[in-house]
C-alpha cells in the first residue's frame, strides 16, 4: 500500500512546486525544469531536427510555461501541459523556418527517394526519414505526434486545436504520401 | 539488408506501379521511425536554464490583476446573473421545447419527413455530369407528428416524450444514412473528372454538416451508430476536398478510408430494408 501514498505525496509535492514556481520561486522553477527538461528537449528536437532550434524551442517553452503557470488548472499533468506548449512553440518555429527551409524536400523529389542503388538498413532508415521530412508541415506534425511520439488523436486535436477528424485525415494523407514516396521499397515474398 | 523489405532494383524487368502497403509502411515505421530526429547528444541544461533565468529576471511580477480586469469581470458577472434571472422568469426553456416540437426554428434536433423529393446534387448543372442521381438527397426534414401514436396525446406546447424523441432521432439518422449511401454509391460509379469531383464535394459538404449535427445529438449515444457517424465524418471530409488539383493519392486515401471502415456495408446494415422508399 505504499505506492498510492507515494503517488499522493509526489502529487502534492508537484502541486506545491507548481504554486511556488507560479509565484516566481526560482528554486521551485529549477526543480520543475530539471524534472521535465529532457522530455521537452527530446520532443523539440524531434520536430526541429537540429540542436539550435531544439534549444530555442525548449527555452521558449519554459519561459512561456513559467509566465502562465498561474493559469495551469491541474486538468492534465504538468508534463502534458508542457508538451502541448512545446509542440505549439515547435510549430511556430517551423513555420518561421519554412520560408527559408533548408531541410524541406519537395514531395516530387521525395518520390525519387526509393530509387537508388544497393543499400542496407542505414539507407532504408535515411530514406524513411527523408520522406518524413518531405511531408507538408501539417502532415508531418500529426505523423510524428501519432506514429512516433504515441499521442492519441484526441491529444493531438487538443494540442493543435483542431478536430479529431482533422488529425485522422492528416495522418491518413501523410501515410499515403509516405507509401507513395517509398514505393520502391517493397516486400519480397519468401 | 532488411529481412522483410528490400529495395526494388532499378533494372527490374517489371515497372513498379503500386505504392508500399500499409503493413510494409508499419514495419518501416516500427523499425526506423523511433530514430527520426532522435536527440542523441547531451541536453544543454545549464545553458538553457541561464537563458530562461535571464528572460525571467526581465519580467516584473504582477501579484494582482489590473483594476480594469476586475471591473470587467464584475460587469460580466452581473450581466450574466441578470440574463439568467430574465430567462428564468420568462420560462424560456419551456418555449424552446415548444418550438422544437413544432419544428419551426433551426435546431440540432433532427426532424423527420422530407419537405423535398428531388434527388439532385447540390450545385448540379444540366448536362454536366454523368453521376447517377440518387433518389435521396441531403434533406432539411421537418418534424410532423403523426395523428396517432407517440405524439397523439401531446399538445403543441408540451415537450415530446423521450420515446417520441428517440423515434424521431432514429428516423432522421436512418434517412441520413440513406442519403450518404447514395452519395458513396455515386462516387464509386462516377467518372473521376473535374465536374463530377466538384459536385460530389458540394454534396458531401452538405451531408457533412448533417453528420456533425447528428454526432452532437442524442442520436449518437448508440456506440455503433456513433462509430459509423465518426467514420462517415472522416470520409465526407476527405470527399469535400476532392478537386481537379488533387492527385490520385487523395482519391486513394478516400478509397482507403471507405474500404478500411467497410462503410457502405455498415450503412446498408444500419438502414432497415425498404427504409429509403418509405421515409
Image (tube, coloured by chain):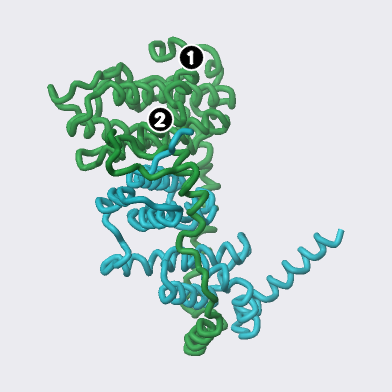
Tags 2 and 1 on a common chain: yes
For chain B, the rendered hue is green
Residue at 32%, 69% in the rendered image: A96
Give residue B138's position: percent from left, percent from top. Answer: 33, 27
Q: In the figure, is residue B148 to the left or right of B7?
A: right
Give the structural element (helix, strand or loop) at label 1: loop
Give the structural element (helix, strand or loop) at label 2: helix
Q: Nearer the viewer, residue A80 or A58?
A: A58
Residue at 61%, 81% in the rendered image: A30
Give residue B98's position: percent from left, percent from top. Answer: 48, 32
Q: Which mark is residue B272?
A: 1
Against B163, residue B205 (above or below) is below
Is residue B48 among the parts visible in the rendering? yes
Give residue B5's position: percent from left, percent from top. Answer: 45, 43
Q: Earlier in the sequence, mark 2 or mark 1?
A: 2
Give residue B56's position: percent from left, percent from top. Answer: 51, 85
- Number of marks: 2
Task: Identify the image quadrant of the C terminus of chain B.
Answer: top left
Residue at 67%, 76% in the rendered image: A17
The mark lying in front, picked from 2 and 1, is: 2
- From the rendered image, report the letter of the chain displayed in cyan: A
- Residue receiving disc 2: B258
Amino acid at each position: 500500500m505504499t505506492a498510492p501514498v507515494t503517488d499522493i505525496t509526489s502529487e502534492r509535492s508537484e502541486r506545491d512546486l507548481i504554486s511556488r514556481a507560479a509565484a516566481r520561486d526560482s528554486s521551485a522553477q529549477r526543480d520543475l525544469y530539471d524534472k521535465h527538461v529532457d522530455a521537452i528537449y527530446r520532443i523539440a528536437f524531434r520536430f526541429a531536427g537540429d540542436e539550435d532550434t531544439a534549444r530555442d524551442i525548449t527555452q521558449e517553452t519554459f519561459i512561456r510555461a513559467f509566465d502562465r503557470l498561474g493559469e495551469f488548472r491541474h486538468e492534465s499533468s504538468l508534463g502534458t501541459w508542457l508538451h502541448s506548449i512545446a509542440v505549439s512553440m515547435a510549430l511556430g518555429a517551423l513555420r518561421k523556418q519554412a520560408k527559408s527551409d533548408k531541410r524541406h524536400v519537395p514531395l516530387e523529389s521525395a518520390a525519387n527517394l526509393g530509387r537508388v542503388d544497393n543499400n542496407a538498413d542505414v539507407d532504408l532508415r535515411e530514406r524513411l526519414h527523408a520522406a518524413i521530412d518531405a511531408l507538408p508541415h501539417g502532415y508531418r506534425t500529426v505523423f510524428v505526434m501519432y506514429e512516433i511520439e504515441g499521442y492519441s488523436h484526441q491529444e493531438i486535436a487538443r494540442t493543435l486545436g483542431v478536430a479529431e477528424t482533422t488529425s485522422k485525415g492528416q495522418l491518413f494523407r501523410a501515410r499515403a504520401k509516405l507509401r507513395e514516396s517509398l514505393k520502391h521499397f517493397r516486400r519480397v515474398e519468401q | 539488408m532488411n529481412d522483410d523489405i528490400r529495395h526494388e532494383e532499378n533494372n527490374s524487368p517489371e515497372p513498379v506501379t503500386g505504392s508500399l502497403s500499409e503493413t510494409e509502411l508499419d514495419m518501416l515505421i516500427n523499425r526506423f521511425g523511433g530514430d527520426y530526429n532522435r536527440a542523441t547528444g547531451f541536453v544543454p541544461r545549464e545553458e538553457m536554464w541561464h537563458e530562461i533565468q535571464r528572460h525571467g529576471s526581465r519580467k516584473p511580477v504582477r501579484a494582482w490583476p489590473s483594476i480594469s480586469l476586475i471591473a470587467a469581470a464584475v460587469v460580466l458577472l452581473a450581466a450574466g446573473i441578470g440574463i439568467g434571472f430574465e430567462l428564468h422568469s420568462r420560462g424560456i426553456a419551456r418555449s424552446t421545447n415548444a418550438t422544437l416540437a413544432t419544428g419551426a426554428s433551426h435546431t440540432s434536433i433532427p426532424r423527420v419527413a422530407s419537405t423535398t423529393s428531388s434527388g439532385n446534387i447540390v450545385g448540379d448543372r444540366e448536362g454536366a455530369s454523368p453521376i447517377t442521381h440518387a433518389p435521396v438527397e441531403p434533406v432539411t426534414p421537418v418534424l410532423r407528428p403523426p395523428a396517432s401514436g407517440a405524439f397523439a396525446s401531446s399538445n403543441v406546447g408540451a415537450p415530446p416524450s423521450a420515446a417520441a424523441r428517440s423515434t424521431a432521432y432514429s428516423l432522421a439518422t436512418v434517412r441520413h444514412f440513406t442519403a450518404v449511401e447514395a452519395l458513396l454509391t455515386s462516387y464509386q460509379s462516377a467518372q473521376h473528372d473535374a465536374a463530377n469531383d466538384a459536385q460530389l464535394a458540394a454534396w458531401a459538404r452538405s451531408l457533412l454538416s448533417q453528420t456533425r449535427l447528428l454526432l452532437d445529438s442524442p442520436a449518437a449515444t448508440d456506440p455503433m451508430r456513433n462509430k459509423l457517424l465518426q467514420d462517415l465524418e472522416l470520409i465526407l471530409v476527405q470527399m469535400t476536398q476532392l478537386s481537379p488539383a488533387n492527385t490520385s493519392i487523395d482519391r486513394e486515401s478516400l478509397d482507403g478510408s471507405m474500404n478500411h471502415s467497410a462503410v457502405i456495408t455498415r450503412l446498408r446494415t444500419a438502414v432497415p430494408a425498404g427504409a429509403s422508399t418509405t421515409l
